[in-house]
Image (spheres, grey):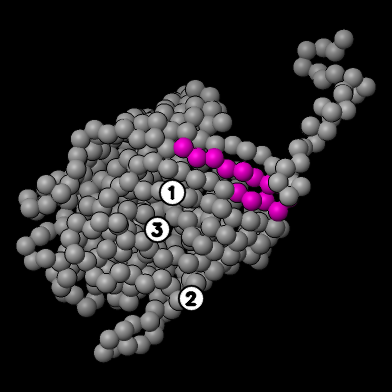
Amino acid sequence: MPTYGEGPPPEAVDQADEDATIGRRGLFGFCHALSGTGILGLTGQRAIPADPALKPLVPGGVTGFVTFGGNATLTSGRFVGDTYVGSTVSALGTLTPTARLLFTEASLRVGRIQGGYAPSRFTYWSGEDIAAWALLPARAVTMGAIDLVAQGPWSVTIAAEYNTSSAPPAPLVPGPVATPPNRLPDLVVQSRYVTDRLELHAAAGFRRVDRTGAAAETSLGAAATVGLKWTFDAFGAEHVLAGQFAYARDLPTYLGSSFDIRAIASTIRADEATRGWSGVVSLRRAWTPTIATNLVMSAIDIRFPALRTGRFQALRTAANIVWTPSDEWKVIGELGWGRTTIDLPDRTLQQLDLSATGYSGVLMVQRSF
């Protein structure tokens, strides 16, 4: 008889069981694995527009939300798909609709080459334990990428991405002409250094911008970002400090969160000259093996050289407590605050101020399987 913790002797293993441990042949003859995530939550949010005329157009109160998704991975010629359907938890002061469909990834990777719909190689900070999606700069794009260097902790990747913003389905006020799709994909170059305790990220994006009208010309829009994740021990507990900072010239869709991008798409023309930056920083502390807290703050500031007072600004912060009783379960309680300022006097209705302040509270339960 084997002792506790040992497996049975080799001759006792059934041939069918042995085949199962090697892997199951699935679609297209490849080995595959399935997993998924389900989320139930309750959110209370209140957005307070600076202009009283907009108050009847901004919903508030307590609502429930459900999010679910799944992914399939083929270990040979890996395909990864991930779909989420539900409502986002809080816009934290951004006056754009929050309900939407998220299709986060459907890509094919063979060796060092990846193609399909996948997260942009430009962004880094993901905020996996943050419930307020208005704080997350992560986004998915149609892309093709190749790893030029993948050795040890270093990697260098070059990608062609269609990073086109999508406008809200129902803007609160009339906006400019809809943003046209990119004629050519953006060029994105990414470099990373990853160890157990330290991760460094640097990336740059470039796009040809075709301006129309009397001053029709072609220019180059550019954006750059740096990010880090540092895990360290202090005051008897493990801490994780993470952040990302980005600067963009004539490329505002590389700044801020997905909520900011949707607001930008409804108010900013695709060929408009802009200068802006965005940043996010978070600190996680593990109090016990199952309980942790997170503090996060983000900001975005976009200026318009052609407008004397034009600007798009947002400042947001959130704090939460995360209980992870097992690898499959996670419970998050979170409070958030945000303030957005949109001042574009050449196109918004003169009698309306699009600025707003928002508050949110979220209770979320996540089950992975």
* Amino acid residing under circle 1: Leu
Q: Is residue 107 above or below residue 60?
A: below
* Amino acid residing under circle 2: Leu
- Left or right of 275? Residue 365 is right
In primary-sequence order, the first of circles 2 and 3 is 2
Q: Is residue 360 above or below residue 181?
A: above
In primary-sequence order, the first of circles 3 and 1 is 1
- Left or right of 33? Residue 43 is left
- Element at badge 1? strand
The image's mark for residue 245 is 3
The image's mark for residue 128 is none
- Image spot of residue 256 (x, y percent): 35, 57
The quadrant in which the C terminus is found is: top right
Q: Residue furthest top?
A: 1
- The magenta stretch is 68-80
Find the distance from the CA under tag 1 to the CA under tag 2.
24 Å
Viewer-closest of 133 and 156? 133
- Image spot of residue 308 (x, y percent): 16, 74
Residue 289 visible to an observer of this rendering: no
What is the quadrant of residue 139 in the picture? bottom left
- Element at badge 2? loop
Q: Residue furthest right?
A: 11
Q: Which residue is mark 2?
A: 184
- Left or right of 227? Residue 195 is right
Q: Which residue is mark 1?
A: 102
Residue 337 visible to an observer of this rendering: yes
Most common SS among magenta residues = strand
Find the distance from the CA under tag 2 to the CA under tag 3.
26 Å
